[in-house]
Image: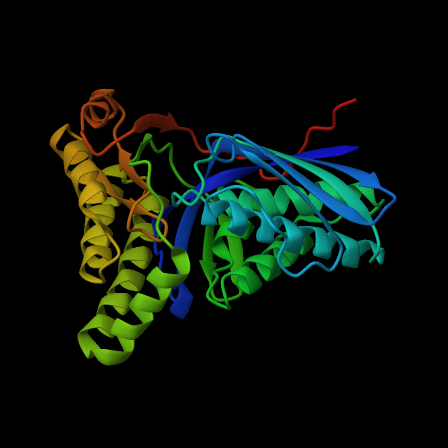
Amino acid sequence: MQTSSAPGKLYLFGEHAVVYGEPAIACAIERRATVTARKREDGRLRVNARNLTLNGFTVEYDRGTASPDIDAGDSLDAAATSYVDGAIAQARDAADAPDAGFEITIESEIPLGAGLSSSAAVVVAAIDAASRELGVDLDVRELARRAYEVEYDAQDGQASRTDTFCSATGGAVRVEGEDCRPIDVPNLPFVIGYDGGAGETGDLVSGVRELRERYGFAAATVDAIGDVVREGERALEAGDVKQVGELMDFDHGLLAALGVSARSLDAMVWAARDAGAVGAKLTGAGDGGCIVALDPSEESTRALRYTVDCVEAFRAELDAEGVRREDRS
């Protein structure tokens, strides 16, 4: 039996634009998904997800089953299982063990579908745990590559490398096309607000694509997000947290112009700003989920907890560690 964990992440800058080759900057946070893999000899895959949703779910199916029957009542649960299925396929491929069966247990501190890369964390941890259970030790970049392939397939070719690379390596990362690398950032006082919802990433990415193809100014908006990222990178290098916050505000406005924000996200962004945050924006695909603010005080956290649209507010520290082995006896 092997157990691995991987962190969630937030976008500091660049979501949606990164799909079109613009740069993005993301930071791993100290909320993790943990996956335990135990080999079984019958070729079947049993997935037991604890805390992935309120009640979790369990599903068991044969290798090669295209669409397992999941008694879970939520499309997000079915989507989560498809990611695990892809991760196990990658582990089998890495070990040249196409008939290997597994008992998989998932525990997660990351809200599902909320813009904090819960799926990437699960995929990275699952590939690492399952491949090690089959006797294969993947290096971090190979792990990130395989995890990206899972997300690429699951999201119909619309995935970015950002989520899986950041989850595999930890820390702060810069991604532009296939160029993925760690970067240094100053201490950033992250505050996360969560509205309890989740956007449909594929639909949101498709919506931005349609706008970009229809209107030149929408394409220019995507390009402008790339410019914000480049300015943000310079501000991070200079340690100018105030300017980082200002650029986060710009980024949120551009994302809202592309139609991927929501009233709940805007309400949380303004609550944090009014409480003194130096910047606040949505993180992830949008249309529900999470916002990130920068505030060293407790004021933004307190304000978010009193915001009607916010169901949870918490501080998040940068997690310098990516995939981690947490084997249990």
Residue 120, given in percent of the width and then of the height, sits at: 54, 48
Res 329 visible? yes
Residue furthest to the right in view is 41
Hey, which quadrant is residue 34 in on the image? Answer: top right
User: Residue 128 vs residue 314: left or right?
Assistant: right
Res 169 visible? no
Hey, which quadrant is residue 294 in on the image? Answer: top left
Numbered label tally: 0
The structure residue drawn at horizontal position 25% and vertical position 72%, both measured from the top left corner, is 211
Residue 3, given in percent of the width and then of the height, sits at: 71, 33
Residue 311, given in percent of the width and then of the height, sits at: 29, 29
The structure residue drawn at horizontal position 52% and vertical position 41%, both measured from the top left corner, is 72
Task: Looking at the picture, tell me which residue is in the foreground, 91 or 199.
Answer: 199
User: Residue 325 vs residue 9: left or right?
Assistant: right
| Position of the C terminus by quadrant | top right
The structure residue drawn at horizontal position 52% and vertical position 57%, both measured from the top left corner, is 180
- Residue 64 versus residue 54 in the image, above or below: below
Task: Indicate how the structure is coloured in the image.
Answer: rainbow
User: Residue 33 vs residue 44: left or right?
Assistant: left
| Position of the N terminus by quadrant | top right
The structure residue drawn at horizontal position 14% and vertical position 38%, both measured from the top left corner, is 270
